[in-house]
Image: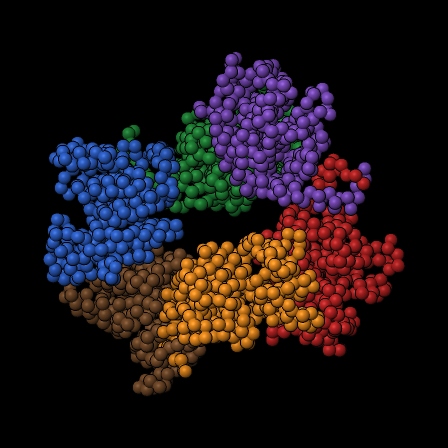
Chain colours: A orange, B brown, C blue, D green, E purple, F red
Amino acid sequence: MDITNANRAQVLVQALPYIQKYAGKTVVVKYGGNAMVNEDLKDAVMSDIVLMQLVGINVVLVHGGGPEISGMLKKIGKESRFVDGLRVTDAETVDVVQMVLAGKVNKDLVQLLERHNGRAIGLCGLDGGMIKAKKLAAQEDLGFVGEITQVNTDIISHATANGYVPIVATVAGGENGEVYNINADIAAARIAAEMGALKLILMTDIKGLLADKDDENTLIPVVNVSDVPKLQNQGIISGGMIPKIDCCVEAVRRGVSRAHIIDGRIPHSILIELFSDEGIGTMFC
Amino acid sequence: MDITNANRAQVLVQALPYIQKYAGKTVVVKYGGNAMVNEDLKDAVMSDIVLMQLVGINVVLVHGGGPEISGMLKKIGKESRFVDGLRVTDAETVDVVQMVLAGKVNKDLVQLLERHNGRAIGLCGLDGGMIKAKKLAAQEDLGFVGEITQVNTDIISHATANGYVPIVATVAGGENGEVYNINADIAAARIAAEMGALKLILMTDIKGLLADKDDENTLIPVVNVSDVPKLQNQGIISGGMIPKIDCCVEAVRRGVSRAHIIDGRIPHSILIELFSDEGIGTMFC
Amino acid sequence: MDITNANRAQVLVQALPYIQKYAGKTVVVKYGGNAMVNEDLKDAVMSDIVLMQLVGINVVLVHGGGPEISGMLKKIGKESRFVDGLRVTDAETVDVVQMVLAGKVNKDLVQLLERHNGRAIGLCGLDGGMIKAKKLAAQEDLGFVGEITQVNTDIISHATANGYVPIVATVAGGENGEVYNINADIAAARIAAEMGALKLILMTDIKGLLADKDDENTLIPVVNVSDVPKLQNQGIISGGMIPKIDCCVEAVRRGVSRAHIIDGRIPHSILIELFSDEGIGTMFC
Amino acid sequence: MDITNANRAQVLVQALPYIQKYAGKTVVVKYGGNAMVNEDLKDAVMSDIVLMQLVGINVVLVHGGGPEISGMLKKIGKESRFVDGLRVTDAETVDVVQMVLAGKVNKDLVQLLERHNGRAIGLCGLDGGMIKAKKLAAQEDLGFVGEITQVNTDIISHATANGYVPIVATVAGGENGEVYNINADIAAARIAAEMGALKLILMTDIKGLLADKDDENTLIPVVNVSDVPKLQNQGIISGGMIPKIDCCVEAVRRGVSRAHIIDGRIPHSILIELFSDEGIGTMFC
Amino acid sequence: MDITNANRAQVLVQALPYIQKYAGKTVVVKYGGNAMVNEDLKDAVMSDIVLMQLVGINVVLVHGGGPEISGMLKKIGKESRFVDGLRVTDAETVDVVQMVLAGKVNKDLVQLLERHNGRAIGLCGLDGGMIKAKKLAAQEDLGFVGEITQVNTDIISHATANGYVPIVATVAGGENGEVYNINADIAAARIAAEMGALKLILMTDIKGLLADKDDENTLIPVVNVSDVPKLQNQGIISGGMIPKIDCCVEAVRRGVSRAHIIDGRIPHSILIELFSDEGIGTMFC
Amino acid sequence: MDITNANRAQVLVQALPYIQKYAGKTVVVKYGGNAMVNEDLKDAVMSDIVLMQLVGINVVLVHGGGPEISGMLKKIGKESRFVDGLRVTDAETVDVVQMVLAGKVNKDLVQLLERHNGRAIGLCGLDGGMIKAKKLAAQEDLGFVGEITQVNTDIISHATANGYVPIVATVAGGENGEVYNINADIAAARIAAEMGALKLILMTDIKGLLADKDDENTLIPVVNVSDVPKLQNQGIISGGMIPKIDCCVEAVRRGVSRAHIIDGRIPHSILIELFSDEGIGTMFC
């Protein structure tokens, strides 16, 4: 479709009330899935971030990097093993996790955002003592998989105050100098809560929460967190959705106004979520 | 045309480089003509102003109000008389000019912008001693038609620094406490120059400068101010265009980067000018 | 009387404790009556305002303009009609009210204060959404006579913080973009209350509250607001005094330390009130 | 003479242009002579200082204390000896000078100003390393009589910025920790120069510079510093006047706009100088 | 002992946790005794103060000057007389006290600290109205011996905020302009309390509180203020110790974290107290 | 050796003049060699850094990580190859370089400093667009070995202003989004120059520049950069020393006051250099 200048102006003007609503507020985006793999989607996300920053939103980008970790482990001849979706992480593995997340994925994103004329700073949970963790209690020993014990977002606030988009890799420091691998969804939720964010946005590879998981036309656009247990009993929330939705519930419970599960496969899904009434995906409030 | 959310996002992202270019810069808009009469156009202009303010542009709105003045004069049984396009302004008339411009047109615009969720402040050349003037030298005595002698934009800068859009009615104070009626195009140009504005935008009821004044398809999109004399000799610049283009030339000569004559009859013509490569109307640089 | 330099110095030194008491405090002056008509009195008031500003008082000047409105209405062939002292205000009238108050009286005062080397800014209730109003409930339909619903003095605070004396014309905006004529005494009282002013000063054409209204030697210099009902019962407060004194009571009840009714016919009555122990007129506390 | 409230107001208003002229400027007053002895004059000077501070003048008070020093020396059985008007100052004497000036005269003035509701801080040339000196070269050994080598007014600026009137006793530190007695007129001139003061005011016990030193009606109100040598040749400037006038000339040469020799025996002579057109005493410019 | 560079580095590094603990905190030191007489000890104290300031501690130095006062009184032929350790202070004496403390001892300390590259300002209780006092109630009339009625440490806070070490002589102003001699220990305790100091350090000529006052090996390093009455009953706290320990108790009761009685005869006793675990002298908490 | 508290105090006091000299200044430390391998040395360096920060020095820590890179390359079965001391860096290698430097070595140092109670932030040349590079011109193709084209230390200044020690891994961004491996000595020198640092300190595994490279007793403590060519001709500067000394020369030429080559094998060598007169290693000035 050809967009005329008149349409352009109309769209910008329609964005007005949203810009007014979000200016000066904090939005934490958990970046992941296809949107972090496909080059066009990556460019689209970077544009979205830069635009958000320009209209006065404090954006924080939190990311994982499972595929890159697995790739590197394979290179050094190490098989990835998972228990209940969690990577079994021995000492050698956690070193690779840290290297790949904080050194490769994170800094590549920094460079990409800078190339889109954004200003970015690459941080991990070790910088400024941002995230503290302890060994996650689990039936099987998962090694250096961590559970967050403390979040201090001072370093993030300093970064946004100085005009940088903080990009956060979720490794955390333990009490005795060991490093833990932290689930990025959970870290994003905790950071959002700590910063009193207006929104937490989890980018996924699904359309959102579906009433019938086999029918994409049954998207549930809004869920009140108090209805989550019921939906879980009904089997509507199930499988891989459970931990993601738990993050949303947790964030809302800790004071984040809205938490969203959106479809990162759609270009500019973040902007669509922010700048339209109907939004995209499923919103928890 | 129906605009999809995908289009919306695309438009917003395409606006990015323009927003980055204008953020923190000053744009002075001379508001007038049809865009100040037609209710839909008025709403569109107000939206444009609010959007500009939100993305970090310091907008200054300068306005005239010829028709409203003539209307009021008629009400008190006074005929409007013009010499070379200038209103002959006796003492009673200049009182009406001041009342209508600074009290009615100006404050109505303030209210309209506030109703669009903007924050506005209505000023005239008397406030903070902003514009000083003396009697315009002319063959025939025009009364209280003034020529600017001094411009002090401190009060405008204070207003923008505090988050208000200054809306300026162009009456000015004389040395002995008399008040002068000032041409709004000229005042806008001088304010733009004084503030080191990036752009001066004159809203008119024509498409711009036409190579053949009878053919709207002959728009000249860009004019270098050094070519203006030649264009005048060729008769391309003539009639009512001369003073407007003089303002543009003057503004550019005093350091304004770009001066524009745009077609205020087109909705959102300001946004189109600011947020597209081809712009709209004629640009002087 | 010839004042020697020694007397001069003595007077300045005697003003010291008053200056110390008022520095940094807000004083709202309702300007009106003879003091706004007689040229010498006007000059005296302007000097008083500039002096107050210089010694560190945040002065806010609120004004009406009944005679000027009536004059303009007459010019357009419209009779002024009053019910219980309130002007019946149809749509055409409220336009004239706005024009005359915000465009003529207000900006003339701005110019006058600037000519006395003050720095002034002319505002009305529409600027920055300062005063919101609704139709005043009354037995007879009074048209666009408004009752204040909300006062936001941010724009006044910004003005004083930037070194300007805000001069306020009391027209206000309604919910649907209509404009209301607001009683200036009431507006002054509300602004004083909103700003936590130290003093509200109402300039009138009477000496103050008299025990015997026919004997100017019976001035009551101080009234405790709790005694007002009794004085009203005794008939000492009556007629045109009632609404003015209601304003004073209201202001004091809302936290203004002192409210004064002073005689604007005496030159420099404001200074005399501020800088002498005995003051002038009647003080409500 | 009885001063009416009307006169009071008139005086205050007439002070306006002077207040506007001096606000934010620095005035250094050398305090001495009768005005430092007579209790009524002392009170008058303190009032003047507090008033100056209140209307926004940065006042610096520099003082000597010859009589108090002589009195204390006498108490310890030590004769004061002078050579060319300079006190011969042995080690024991300089200790007394420091004690009396910095500990008694200075702090008594601080207390007196505080009791007039001013805020004062008592400093000497040792505080913050304000004044550095070396032994004054002279034919006869004068002991610890110093010549200023360096002035650093940071500590004075900090004091005024925090709202205190700095009161300065003129003892200074030498290179090896010794202390010097410094002429207060010279120190005042140097401090005024260093601070870019608008005025230096030397309070004396004479009317000013007289054309005929025996006739008080021959006061010369204004002297251009370039005319000083000629006046000296004519014998009009002679005797004890020479060093005082040298201070004035020096101050003006180093950038102080105006230097004044005023008659401290007249109550409020400082205010009269500041707040009248004709001033008082002799002005050097 | 010869200290190698390696030892040097080790010492500096061991000081780290103490520096971190004290940075930005206030420490009030009462300076007196031998440490104020012996030249080497004086130099050592000055070094300690400058170091404390450099590592970010807000140091306030409060001093007495009994021996210097007695010396000066003797010079003017006046005998010092004491009742219960308090100097009987007639009008002539209090003048000497003020001169010697605020003019000599205080300013000499300022100069000494400046010569150690510190930045100092010499204040007394009169400056900025810091200490207000009334006549101390006592059985025998002690004259101008004062009891503190009010402490306002604004002037001290301004000094430290501007980078100066405030050095305070403890004379205070009375209600009618009289001056009182104030006990320096008590003044230091009150200033420490008023400023919410972390520590009050009283420099004395004893080792601290001894279990057996004749055996220096019986030092009691830590005393809980609640145990003081018991220690007094046991006779362990007795004689000249009582008022000093009362100061410590008072300071702790008013919110000072720790109060110390240290042995000023040991070089750098302040640093040893601050920068070692075992500290020095007796700590009250 | 047992260090007494008296010695401790003496050392601290002797550090005073150095602390005064360095407070508020920038010192860039290139960290490397044994001091980055031996655990005790690492702890000592971290203590030194924290102490420097506490006494007001802006420390910037720049590091390499050659051994860690080689180790990781070996793990993925890739041989390290060097030409003239430069690692041949293909696309796969530069990924490993980035991961190891920015993700492992850098963040491990951040964690270590935080564990010593410092506040650290881990940056690389990509963050905030800090270092831009292009392919190093060389006879043999070295792949992604870069030459610095631009250094922007804004992000470093923001970090120090917010109280963090910036730790910098020296990978840089190219024009087309590629990443380059940058020599850490050179990067440190350029950052020091850009920041107007007082000192550049290169930590090495040698004693400094030796007159006779086989005799450690022939250390040359100070070299004027103008003498470097002569020393090179004499063969005193040779081999691996050449590039390090070139860095020092370059830094001094670009305005760094002093550049040092120090022996990182000695514990606390940085403190010894900073806090002793004789310093350590070789100083270039």
Residue D39 sits in quarter? top left
Q: Closer to the camera, D125 or C32?
A: C32
Residue C93 in sight in this render? yes
Whether residue C219 is situated above or below residue A243 in the rendered picture: above
Q: Nearer the viewer, residue C147 or C50?
A: C147
F37 vs C48, left or right, is right
Seen at 26% across and 45% down, the residue is C189
Q: Is residue F284 visible?
A: no
Residue D260 appears left or right of C179: right
State the residue at coordinates (14%, 49%).
C85
The mark tally for this picture is 0
The x and y percentages for residue F21 are 67, 47
| In the depicted structure, whether residue C112 falls above or below residue C224 | below
State the residue lying farthest toward the top: E140
Rendered residue at 40%/80% (across/down): A3
Residue at 51%, 36% (x, y): give it. E155
Q: Position of residue A206 (x, y in %)?
A: 48, 72
| Residue C208 coordinates in the image, percent (x, y) | 20, 37
Of the 4 image quadrants, the one containing the N terminus of chain D is top left
Q: Quadrant of residue B277?
A: bottom left
